[in-house]
């Protein structure tokens, strides 16, 4: 409507209101250019991925002769079969799940309680606690690596928990580091989210005699379901993509999670980049699927912390 | 409101915590706090302590005072190039990738068609691990079959985009921006959606054009997002590691502080004291930004 006020032109009332909430959608000469530009950017952003898929479908001899950027003569999934069977990827995927599932669940549980205590109970020093966790998540990983390496080497574990008999070179080390490090981000996001919930709900529960645990588990947590789904999705991809922790805390190549195992694949398939491309696509596939299926959650997870309700 | 400390006394407390409540609080706050101390803050302090020693990880720990720092600054040829690369990384993300993400967010927020498609595509690289980004970079920039060299058709004398110590850092920064731009765009899109449309209308009525509306009216209201984006940009630039490590283990032109630390600690030499000193340098720089961010947050929380 604002355009009309400026030009003073008489307005014909629209026959029916548009369903999309776009009140100032004026026809602009630049519109077409914007589409061309965004199309170009989108293509540039997709191209590297499409190229990796394209390269992985073609035999090495062909690309060695003509380069990756050439017309295909043979296309097959042969490299995917080989990448999967020759490198033992199934094992690495299992390792990732063994690490990521407990790490994400425990992180969410512990972080949501801290966030609850910080934002819902009027605890003295709650803010300090929040800062304590948030700042921890922002430290560079390399700062904490050495002492943890030494510490994990000194902590013995029974044989049924770790065949290395120490915390070092066991899944436990990677799980616990992920929990400790990611908790800060989750506390920050969940505390921001819980602050937007109406306080009256809790007050009513307190009048009814609910203890801290009931207030948390039965009343606050169910209301946080969207935030938890969002964070869970996000944290899963982060733990899945972890490269450094496993590189440092796991020495037995058979125990590596999938992302860190890429390094081994590279050594194994050194000369055949098409095979490596197939391996990379396979490794990337789960996070891309998670993204495509749960995009809304994924985006919400990142933005929950930044825009306060 | 929950953290509004000065006004707390005014609000009538309904009940103090029962004994069971205290136990629940003690256990469920105690575990995370303990974990954070053991995993994050304890090791940070230990790193600071170790940086004053000449420890190799096995033998005795000898106190050497500030020797490591002196050596880092004066006798370690890789240090200053790494600092320069980290600063370059920060400037590149901060001056190119972040503003580009903001620009894309503003374009998409104006309500073009297919905006969801554009948004998803530009955001997609964020879910990839930087290690995979490093491998894809090799497919595109490699000397033997790489796409760029094929397009340039210089089969005889290909440009070594990843091997040339003057070129590869730029290629890595472009690859890192591929992910960073989408991340920033999503944060700004969320921020822009929460801007009150009446503000923009009021500005338009006052005769402001699109640019004036954005810079004078919309951008200032995005302050919380700006703070977050700023922190993410700085922290990502200081933490950068996976991508250069995946390409060539962070050598030959791709030295970064994070790589030097890793090399000194897990390399054959295992110079833990020396590596820790570099880590403390990185920590000091990071803490400056972290504290700034926390002060902002603290102020925000007090106002709520």
Image (tube, coloured by chain):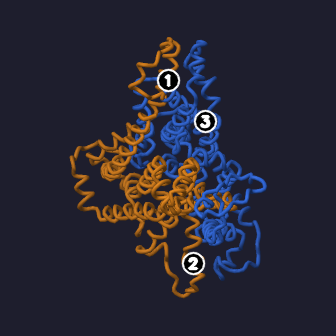
Name the tint of chain A in the rendering.
Answer: blue
Secondary structure under the numbered disc 1 in the rendered image:
loop
Secondary structure under the numbered disc 2 in the rendered image:
helix
Judging depth in this view, the residue of A80 and A302 nearest the camera is A302
Query: Which residue is pictured at 55% across the width and 49% down the height?
Result: B195
Secondary structure under the numbered disc 3 in the rendered image:
helix
Which numbered marker is on residue A121?
Answer: 1
User: What is the CA distance from the residue labelled 2 to the residue labelled 3?
Assistant: 43 Å
Left or right of B158, for residue A71 = right
Residue A273 visible in the snapshot: no
Judging depth in this view, the residue of B299 and B38 nearest the camera is B299
Left or right of A306, for residue B54 = left
Chain coloured orange here = B
Kindly indicate the quadrant of the structure image that contains residue A101.
top right
The residue indicated by pointer 3 is A105
- Would you place residue A158 above or below residue A277 in this image? above
């Amino acid at each position: 409507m604002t355009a009309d006020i400026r030009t003073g032109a008489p307005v014909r009332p629209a026959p029916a209101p548009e369903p999309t909430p776009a009140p100032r959608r004026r026809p602009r000469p630049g519109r077409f250019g914007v589409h061309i530009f965004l199309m170009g950017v989108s293509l540039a952003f997709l191209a590297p991925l499409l190229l990796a898929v394209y390269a992985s479908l073609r035999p090495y001899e062909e690309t060695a002769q003509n380069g990756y950027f050439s017309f295909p003569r043979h296309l097959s999934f042969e490299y995917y079969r080989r990448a999967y069977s020759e490198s033992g990827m199934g094992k690495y995927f299992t390792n990732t799940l063994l690490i990521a599932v407990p790490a994400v669940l425990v992180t969410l549980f512990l972080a949501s309680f801290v966030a609850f205590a910080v934002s819902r109970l009027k605890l003295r020093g709650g803010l300090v606690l929040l800062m304590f966790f948030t700042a921890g998540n922002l430290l560079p990983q390399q700062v904490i690596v050495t002492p943890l390496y030494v510490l994990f080497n000194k902590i013995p574990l029974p044989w049924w928990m770790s065949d290395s008999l120490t915390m070092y070179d066991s899944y436990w080390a990677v799980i616990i580091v992920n929990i400790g490090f990611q908790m800060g981000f989750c506390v920050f996001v969940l505390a921001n989210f819980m602050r937007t919930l109406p306080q009256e709900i809790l007050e009513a529960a307190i009048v009814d005699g609910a203890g801290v645990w009931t207030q948390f588990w039965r009343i606050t947590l169910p209301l946080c379901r969207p935030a938890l789904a969002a964070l869970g999705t996000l944290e899963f991809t982060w733990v899945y993509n972890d490269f450094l922790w496993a590189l440092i805390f796991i020495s037995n190549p058979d125990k590596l999670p999938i992302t860190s195992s890429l390094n081994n694949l590279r050594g194994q398939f050194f000369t055949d980049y098409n095979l490596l491309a197939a391996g990379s696509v396979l490794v990337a596939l789960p996070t891309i699927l998670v993204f495509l299926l749960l995009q809304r959650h994924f985006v919400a997870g990142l933005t929950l912390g930044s825009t306060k309700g | 409101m929950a953290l509004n400390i000065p006004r707390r006394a005014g609000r009538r407390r309904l009940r103090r915590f029962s004994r069971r409540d205290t136990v629940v609080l003690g256990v469920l706050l105690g575990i995370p706090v303990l974990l954070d101390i053991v995993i994050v803050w304890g090791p940070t302090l230990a790193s600071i302590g170790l940086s004053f020693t000449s420890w190799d990880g096995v033998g005795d720990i000898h106190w050497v005072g500030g020797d490591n720092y002196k050596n880092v600054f004066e006798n370690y040829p890789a240090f200053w190039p790494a600092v320069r690369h980290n600063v370059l990384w920060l400037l590149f993300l901060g001056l190119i990738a972040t503003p580009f993400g903001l620009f894309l967010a503003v374009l998409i927020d104006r309500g073009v068609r297919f905006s969801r498609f554009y948004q998803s595509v530009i955001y997609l690289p964020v879910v990839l691990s930087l290690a995979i980004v490093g491998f894809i970079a090799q497919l595109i920039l490699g000397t033997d079959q790489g796409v760029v060299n094929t397009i340039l058709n210089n089969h005889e004398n290909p440009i070594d985009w990843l091997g040339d110590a003057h070129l590869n850092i730029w290629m890595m920064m472009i690859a890192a921006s591929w992910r960073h731009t989408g991340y920033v765009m999503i944060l700004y899109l969320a921020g822009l959606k929460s801007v009150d449309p009446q503000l923009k209308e009021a500005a338009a009525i006052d005769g402001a054009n699109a640019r004036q509306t954005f810079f004078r009216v919309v951008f200032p209201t995005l302050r919380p997002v700006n703070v977050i984006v700023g922190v993410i940009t700085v922290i990502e630039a200081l933490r950068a590691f996976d991508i250069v490590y995946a390409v060539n283990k962070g050598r030959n032109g791709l030295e970064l502080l994070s790589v030097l630390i890793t090399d000194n600690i897990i390399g054959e030499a295992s110079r833990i004291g020396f590596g820790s000193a570099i880590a403390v340098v990185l920590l000091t720089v990071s803490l400056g930004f972290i504290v700034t961010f926390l002060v902002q947050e603290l102020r925000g929380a007090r106002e709520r």
